[in-house]
Amino acid sequence: MENKIDRIELAESIYSKLIDDENNAMELWSKSVDQIKLPASDLPTIDVLTCVYNAEAFIAHAIESILFQSWPNIHLVIVTDPCTDKTIDIIKQYAAKYSNITLHENQDHQGIIACFNKGLEYCQSKFIARMDLDDLIHPLRFEKQMNFLSEHSEIGVISSYMRVFNELKETKDVTYRDDFDIQKITMLFFSPLSHAGSIFRADVIKSIGYRDDFKYAEDFDLWYQIMSRFKTAVYPEFLYLYRTHSNQVTNARNLLIFKKSWFEIMRNLFHDLKLKFTDEDIYYHIDNVLLVPVFANKEDWTTQHLWFNRIVLANKESLYFNHEKLTQFIYHGYWLTPFLKYKNQLNWNTFLSQLFSEINKMTFGQKLKEILKYILKK
């Protein structure tokens, strides 16, 4: 037991230094691999699927954070598009040293979705983990997630919390809901889990794969497909360190591609919800729900209220989402604050329609108090 505690404490100590002192943390990790790693015994192999293009500045530490994991049985699958830097040379140096690395080099530019699907062909284990090769992970990431999966056979995918960091070592913590029903609901608003921070049961992800029509949002589409058929979970620790850097490009053209992919995802989701909608409705949802809405006046708020109300009423019939949790989620996260801000600017009929809408989770007594306050204000 003492050795186990020391092993875990050492891993946690390394992890705590990865962002602020990356080079020294990785050096300590390299020297501590044998002390941290579990005995191989009969533990299953994890295929780690990665795709990379021009990441020479970060790829060495990313590869090491996979190879140095406490989980002993790892097969690292790397698919590359043709690189213009030293990325592939660095990978080959590691592949010459470690026999558990498989490298597939595309001879022409295929794009991330084709790379993912090509990588899946090299994955033969029962578990497939994802990671991007400019990021870092907790030394115990795979161990913690695999222990969870071994105890929860009903779960098809286990993700984790994610800590975002930049070149200035500034951080932002990203957490996810631990309730599967809520994870599914959040697809209406944002991508529900960390794709790169997940381990998939192989039969789950291989039965679905990555679809060509969802460039830059292939992970979002993957969650939509998975959550329609399988249960997901999140390990409630920051096991994934997501690096943002100047080489990453977000521009107007990419945003248009994002929106095109989101359009198709929302179209599929609204069909499942049995919501009657137009193309204009989907674009409204993208601009005012998926992207951060800006309410300039009570008319903007009333439009969004009516849209949310349509979603809730459709779900009341289809029950695609857990209905009580959907209404609670919208009420607390998106509805209550703007309603309280604009309620006294609304005319009487609009005020009453919002107050007694399906979304409003106030008690009857609370609603009566709102009516009284509205009258007194007038």
Image (cartoon, rainbow, N blue to C red):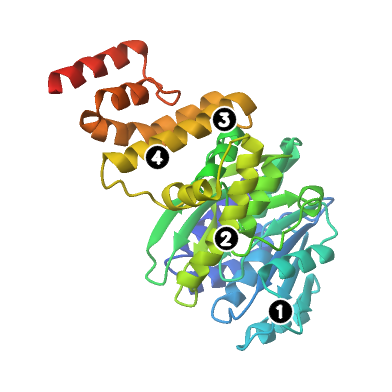
Residue 102 on image: x %, y %: 79, 73
Q: Nearer the viewer, residue 188 or 353?
A: 353
The residue sitting at 46% across, 63% down in the picture is: 17
Q: How many marks?
A: 4
Q: Secondary structure at mark 3?
A: helix
Question: Is residue 89 positioned above or below 148 on the image?
Answer: below
Residue topped by disc 3? 314
Q: Determine whether label 1 and label 2 are within 8 Å by CB.
A: no
Q: Determine whether label 4 and label 3 are within 8 Å by CB.
A: no
Question: Is residue 286 positioned above or below 19 on the image?
Answer: above
Task: Say which amino acid is labelled 4.
Answer: Gln
The residue sitting at 85% across, 59% down in the picture is: 124
Image quadrant in which you'd find residue 215: bottom right
Determine crowd level at label 2: few under 14, some 14-19, many 20+ residues with C-alpha closer than 10 A: some
What number is the disc on residue 260? 2
Residue 191 on image: x %, y %: 55, 50
Mark 4 vs mark 2, CA separation in Å: 21 Å
Q: Secondary structure at mark 1?
A: helix
Mark 4 or mark 1: whose residue is earlier in sequence: 1
Residue 262 on image: x %, y %: 57, 55
Task: Say which amino acid is labelled 2.
Answer: Lys
Q: Secondary structure at mark 2?
A: helix
Q: Nearer the viewer, residue 364 or 119?
A: 364
Mark 2 or mark 3: whose residue is earlier in sequence: 2
Mark 4 or mark 2: whose residue is earlier in sequence: 2
